[in-house]
Image (spheres, grey):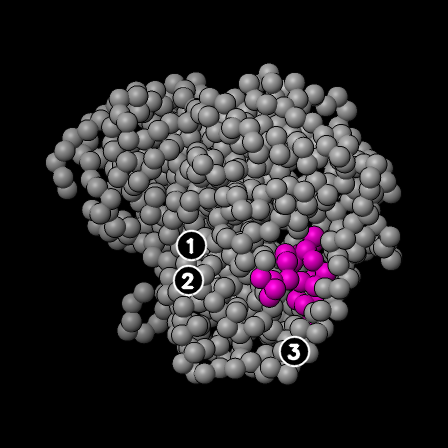
Amino acid sequence: MTNAPQEIERHTFAVLVDNEPGVLARVIGLFSGRGYNIESLTVAEVDAAERVSRITIVTTGTRMVIEQIQAQLDRLVPVHRVRDLTAEGRSIERELALVKVTGTGERRIEAMRIAGIFGARVVDATLSSFVFEITGASEEIEDFIGLMSQLGLIELCRTGTVAIHRGATGF
Amino acid sequence: MSGEQLTGSEIVLRALRDQGVDIVFGYPGGAVLPIYDSLFQQNDVRHVLVRHEQGAVHAAEGYARSTGKVGCVLVTSGPGATNAVTGLLDAMMDSIPLVCLTGQVPTHLIGNDAFQEADTTGITRPCTKHNYLVKDVNDLARTLHEAFYVARSGRPGPVVIDIPKDIQFASGPYVGPHEVRHRTYRPQMKPELARVEEAVELMASANKPIFYTGGGVVNSGPFAARLLTQLVRMTGYPCTSTLMGLGGFPASDPLFLGMLGMHGTYEANLAMYHCDVMINIGARFDDRVTGKLSEFSPGSRKIHVDIDPSSINKNVHADVAVVGDAAHVLEDMIRIWKARQKRPDQAALDDWWAEIGTWRRRDCLRYQRSEQVIKPQFALERLREHLRGRDVYITTEVGQHQMWAAQFLPFDEPNRWLTSGGLGTMGYGLPAAIGAQLAHPDATVIDIAGEASILMNIQELATAVQHRAPVKLFILNNQYMGMVRQWQELLHGGRYAESYMDALPDFVKLAEAFGCVGLRATAVGEVDDVIRQMLDTPKPVVVDVAVDPHENCFPMIPGGRAHNEILLGPEEKIEEATPEEGMVLV
């Protein structure tokens, strides 16, 4: 499309889908087949009785690409509804990370202190290691990881973003 | 739920019957034997045995495209399914409604690399509108009805149902089509009225309007084509069509400018370039149509009517976007145009037609006539004369002959022109012609072919003979992959790498070997004679027309160029070297 803004934007989509076999492959295949980016993707069933799953996708692209992604997702047969939470504004995004840090002495104490500041919980400990559980916006988690990488971070696991719209109305 | 218990294979046949399927195109194999056994024991659904599964899918496309109904295919697992893939993607790209049943190894063997096992749903996921693997016979009837609903609703497309062999043997309940309602899929058919009103206001304000119509009109049905014709005539605006849309508006109408795009007419492309309001009904701004995007119709405001919201703003920004089925939208447009007593600015419109008239007088389809050699355009002109007054369906293969057929054969009705537009599948035309012929036994069905394309599915001649489908193959034989050679000539220094067809078969003997009639024309004076003989023969006929091997297809907008850089003939050279970004375009 000509004369469209070319800046790369980052958007979070919430997609309600029928939890049928292959539905996740369909969504991922759409992104790879059309050359769209996936920054993160989470999926889980949210209504067992109705067999509905919710997928949260964080993606980047120009305005035109973002619009296309929404239209293409909406076109998939098992998709109930797609919402661009970023475009709608007022949404909350959270991510969970498990962070394994090793060290002794001063470094171990410092890791513990910083975890306290970030509100991370210790979910496993040995005499020379911790596993922290931290929940927050992606930037907070980035900050925490950045500090921990200087204090003996050896392993990291992140869920990717989940997001929900603020206010009293449902999906 | 009805309590009637049937086997899986009986459920398949019952569902096909209840969906109005009269012909299924297929090829048997181990994983579909139960379905073939049920097929054998009933008389509602006729099976047409093809000679390659790709042929089955193209035949079903020909059937679907010429009738407006859902085409139906039945193939076995593994290679049966993978051979069908090209046809499925062809149907996807051209929005043809199909249901393709594939056999699968029994459920307990899935994932074991069993004999003739393929991950059919995995392979076909990106080349179908939707697909299913049925792992429980209780879901089978519902899945079949859903598949037909998905295939024909909204923007049509192919749907695959993969059925493991044990499910075909198992017993389960049958439910009828009316007991099934899809959980999620509800395409928007009726447009938002406010958008249509905006569109009508913009249309009425135009000084240099043009209708740009596509396959969406044909897919919407003959009623949409009638409404389009009514609206265009009401406004007096010029109308052009994409390759897929030909027949949506009568080609013989003076308001019709011919096809647009890479090999479209000079007047259509220049009118697109210079218009101030473009009214796109059911076309998708394909790269064959737009040429260089940044210079595509730079001065126009654009109305885009499409049933598929993802087509809107995909390539070209729409100033007014109307989502809905073409017939519904056109009906609303006509009603609002009349209710608001819209009149075009007649003086401006007269000027616009005068300008178009100067482009028309370039006579862009003119070609160098010859007494020594048969020009392909001449052969098609003669064919056109002989077809007057007949009930005709035309299919094509892919290449120069396809573009010449689009340029030189007039289509006044929808569903008469069957061609592989989006995917450009060589080998489409013969099986598609068989599908169309079986749907219209008394019509004249002609595959305009090239000698290269026709060899890709030539085995289907046996299908035509077996099923008494008297299709006509009109081969414009130039001994080259003509379009490849044309591009090599224009863009690659005339180095004809592998585009010369050495060792071609004798098509007359080939036809006879299959039990068809073979004819040949090598001189200008023989063309009328072979066409007459072809049309008078109530059997499949192969006509080998030896045409000028060096003829190129014009007009042509070279890749990466704008509409106003169109080349009219061999005397016009590409002025400067094609820019690199144009070279990489196909």
Query: Residue visible at 75% across and 51% down?
Result: B554
Q: Is residue B263 magenta?
A: yes
Q: Position of residue B522 (x, y in %)?
A: 76, 30
> What element does badge 1 sit on?
loop
B406 over B471 or under it: above or below: below
Residue B556, can we see it? Answer: no
Q: Amino acid at mark 3?
A: Asp
Q: Amino acid at mark 2?
A: Ala
The subunit carrying tag 2 is B
Identify the residue position indicated by label 1 in the image: B221
Q: Position of residue B159 (x, y in %)?
A: 40, 41
Give the spatial CA distance, label 1 vs label 2: 8 Å
Between marks 1 and 3 in the image, the one whose residue lies nearer the viewer: 3
Query: Residue visible at 63% across and 20% down?
Result: B510
Identify the residue position indicated by label 2 in the image: B327
- The region drawn magenta spans B253-274
Contact check, label 1 and label 2, Cβ < 8 Å: yes
Contact check, label 2 and label 3, Cβ < 8 Å: no
Residue B1, can we see it? Answer: yes
The subunit carrying tag 1 is B
Q: Earlier in the sequence, mark 1 or mark 2?
A: 1
Q: Earlier in the sequence, mark 1 or mark 3?
A: 1
Identify the residue position indicated by label 3 in the image: B350
Q: 10 Å neighbourhood of mark 2: few (<14), some, or many (≥20)? A: many
Is B219 placed left or right of B529 in the picture? left
